[in-house]
Amino acid sequence: MLFAATGLLIGGIDDLIVDLCFLAHRWSKRKAVRPTLATLPRPASPGAFAVFVAAWDEEAVIGGMLAAAVARFEHPDYRLYVGVYPNDPGTIAAATAVAATDSRIRVVIGSRDGPTTKADCLNTLWTALMRDEAAGRVTKAVVLHDAEDVVHPAELTVFDTMIEGRSVVQLPVLPLIRRGSMVSAHYADEFSYAHSVQQPVRAMLGAAMPLAGTGCAIATPILAAIAAERDGAPFDESSLTEDYELGLHVAARGGGSCFARIRDSHDGSLVAVRAYFPDALPTATRQKARWMTGIALAGWDRTGWGRPLALADHWMRMRDRRALVSVLVLAVAYVAVLLWPLAVVLHWLAGTPVADDRLATWLLTTTSVLLGWRLAMRAVCTARDYGWREAAWSLPRFFVGNLISLIAAPRALHRYLKLLRGAPLVWDKTRHEFPDLDMASNV
C-alpha cells in the first residue's frame, strides 16, 4: 500500500508540474492571437514535398488513402512515394491502380520480401527520392504518413511555412472514435492530452521532440546529413520506434522543432492527422507493448540521455521511460484497493480497530486529489477536440487505458528480453481500416 501510494504521489506530482507549465505558458500568451490558417504567413521560399507512406499488407486501406490524399491536398507541388514489398501483390495492385490515375504517386517496390521493418521500407523510399533529386528535383521536406491516415487538405501548406528555419514540424494526431468501443476511444483521450499539453510543454522547455511517425515533416537537408552518417539510410532499421528516435537524433544535431496546433479559421477544426486506432483489446495491447518496448526499454538502451545540462530534456525522457514502473505501481495500487475493504471486514469480524495511520490517510487523500486533477485535465483536452460528451466518457476510459497498459507491460518485457537474445526485428503491425471521409472531417 505504501509503495503504491508513494509511486502514485511521485507520478501525480510529475504530471501536475507538466500541467502547471502548460497553464503558465497559456496564461503568458493569453493576449496572443491564436494561429489559424488565415493568419499563417506565406512561406518565404515555397518548396516541393515528398510524402512517404510505408505499406506492408495494406491492401484494404492503401487505395483509399492515396485517392483521398491526392484529392484533398491543396499544395501545388508534392509527390507521394509508397513503399511496398515484392511478396505483397495485393498492396501492390491497390497502390498501382491509384497511381495509374495520378502521376504524383510513385509506387516503389523494395528489393527484399516483407515484412522487414518500417524503417527499412522508409529507407527504400529515401533511395527513390534521392534518384529523383539527382535528376534535378529539389525537395524541401519529407512528410511521413501511415497507410490508414486521412490527411488534412492544408497540412502541406502549414509545413511549407513552419519548416522554414526548423528541421522538424509535427502536427497533432486525432484518433477517430468507433462508436461503442472504449478501447478505440481511449486513444482519443491519450492523444488529445499528449498533443494539447505534453508536446507543447516539451517545445516550450526546449526539450527534444519525438515524432509521432505520422503527420510530421522533416527537412530534407537534415535527413541527408543523417543518411550520410548511416550509409545512405536516414531511418534506423534496428529500431522498433524509428520515428521517436529520429526526433531525438535531430535535436541532438541542433535541429529546431515545432509542434504546430493550427486551426481552420472557418470551422475551428485542427489541421491534424485523423485515423482509426485498434478497437479490440488484443490488438491494442500488442500496439502498446511495441511502444513500451521501443521507447521505455530498447529505446533507453539506444538513445540514452540528452546533453549533460539539458535538464528539461532529461525530465521529458524520464517521463517517456516511466511506463513500466507506472504499470507496476498501478498493479500494486489496484491490489491494495481490492484488499483494503477485506482488511476492514476482517478487523470488524475480529473485533479489533483499524490502525489509525495518518501517513496512509494523507497519502490516500493527496493521491486522490492528484488523480482528480489528472482526470479533469484529460477531460478538458478531450472536450476541446471531441466535445463534452466524449469528455465525460474519458473518465471511465482512463481505467480502460490502465487495463491495456497492465496487459501490455509483460508482453513488452518479454519482447525486450527476446531482442536481447538476438531475435530479429519484424514489422509488428495491426490491421487497419480506412474511415468514411465525411465522418473523419467532422472531428
Image (cartoon, rainbow, N blue to C red):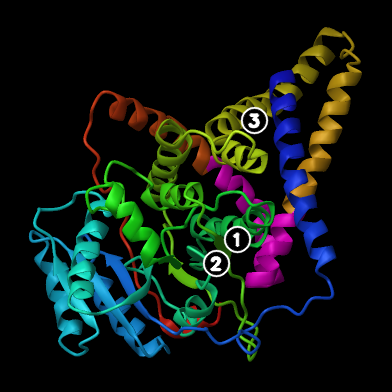
Q: Circle 3: is it few (<14), some (14-19), or many (20+) Cα within 10 Å?
A: few
Residue where numbered disc 3 is placed:
334
The magenta segment is 376-403
- Mark 1–mark 2 distance (CA, rounded to whole Å): 6 Å
Residue 230 horizontal side relative to residue 335, left or right = left
Return the x and y of residue 17 as percentages of the image width and height: 77, 44
Residue 73 occupies which quadrant of the picture? bottom left
Residue where numbered disc 1 is placed:
195
Residue 288 lies, with reference to residue 365, above or below; the image says: below
Q: Earlier in the sequence, mark 3 or mark 2?
A: 2
Camera-nearest residue between 61 and 302: 302
Kindly identify the amino acid type of the residue bearing the numbered disc 2: Pro
Residue 46 horizontal side relative to residue 27, left or right = left
Return the x and y of residue 68 as percentages of the image width and height: 34, 83
- Mark 1–mark 3 distance (CA, rounded to whole Å): 28 Å
SS class, disc 2: loop
Q: Circle 2: is it few (<14), some (14-19), or many (20+) Cα within 10 Å?
A: many
| Residue at image coords 48%, 63% | 168
Q: Earlier in the sequence, mark 1 or mark 2?
A: 2
Residue 77 lies, with reference to residue 214, above or below; the image says: below
Q: Earlier in the sequence, mark 1 or mark 3?
A: 1
